[in-house]
Image (spheres, rainbow, N blue to C red):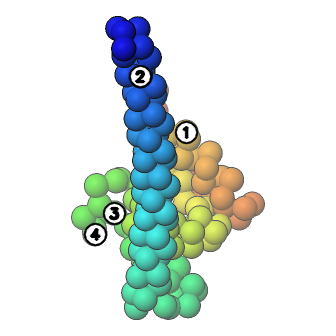
């Protein structure tokens, strides 16, 4: 066997190894995707069993409304109603779904709220009357 023939054999073997590596990577990606979907489903099922999530939505909304009361009496990092509402949306998917589908929670807007959050609130309030909070400083 000559040098060229050895090189062809080596190239063929490397190509075969690359094919196996690609197949292994593809299989691992598929397994990882399956495991991530299964973990997500287990988290969702676990969250459904939490007693708070078994309450009727109307009572749950009342709890959220109470949590959004005057920020001076609570340890919120966000100063505005919508800021606190967005924070509660981050607790879990169920909270986010309930909050986003309850127009009355989105009706209080503070002039300090960022424009993007205000725009979202107006959309989610579904034509309920808005309560605008805040005061404008008079110009000198």
Q: Residue at x 55, y 39 (%)?
A: 115
- Give the image location of residue 10, x and y in percent: 37, 22
- Give the image location of residue 74, x and y in percent: 28, 68
The numbered dot on residue 115 is 1
Q: Residue at x 60, y 54 (%)?
A: 121
Q: Quadrant of residue 47?
A: bottom left
**Relative to 113, is 127 on the left or the right?**
right
Q: Which residue is mark 2?
A: 9
Q: Which residue is mark 4?
A: 73
Mark found first going from the N terminus, 2 or 3: 2
Q: Are marks 4 and 1 in contact (CB under 8 Å)?
A: no
Residue 89 in sight in this render: no
Q: Are marks 1 and 3 in contact (CB under 8 Å)?
A: no
Q: Is residue 9 above or below residue 121?
A: above
Marks 3 and 4, how far apart at CA: 5 Å
Q: Residue at x 59, y 64 (%)?
A: 100
- Nearest to viewer (mark 2 / mark 4): 2
Mark found first going from the N terminus, 4 or 1: 4
Mark found first going from the N terminus, 1 or 2: 2
Count residues near mark 1 (Cα–Cα under 10 Å), then give few for <14, some for 14-19, many for 20+: few
């Amino acid at each position: 066997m000559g040098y060229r023939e050895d090189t062809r054999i080596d190239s063929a073997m490397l190509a075969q190894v690359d094919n196996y590596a690609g197949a292994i990577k593809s299989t691992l990606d598929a397994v990882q995707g399956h495991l991530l979907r299964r973990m997500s489903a287990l988290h969702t099922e676990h969250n459904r069993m939490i007693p708070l999530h078994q309450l009727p939505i109307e009572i749950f909304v009342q709890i959220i409304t109470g949590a959004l009361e005057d920020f001076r009496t609570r340890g919120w990092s966000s100063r505005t109603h919508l800021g606190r509402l967005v924070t509660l949306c981050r607790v879990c998917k169920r909270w986010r779904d309930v909050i986003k589908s309850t127009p009355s929670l989105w009706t209080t807007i503070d002039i300090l709220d960022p424009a993007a959050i205000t725009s979202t609130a107006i959309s989610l309030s579904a034509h309920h009357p808005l309560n605008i909070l805040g005061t404008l400083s008079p110009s000198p």
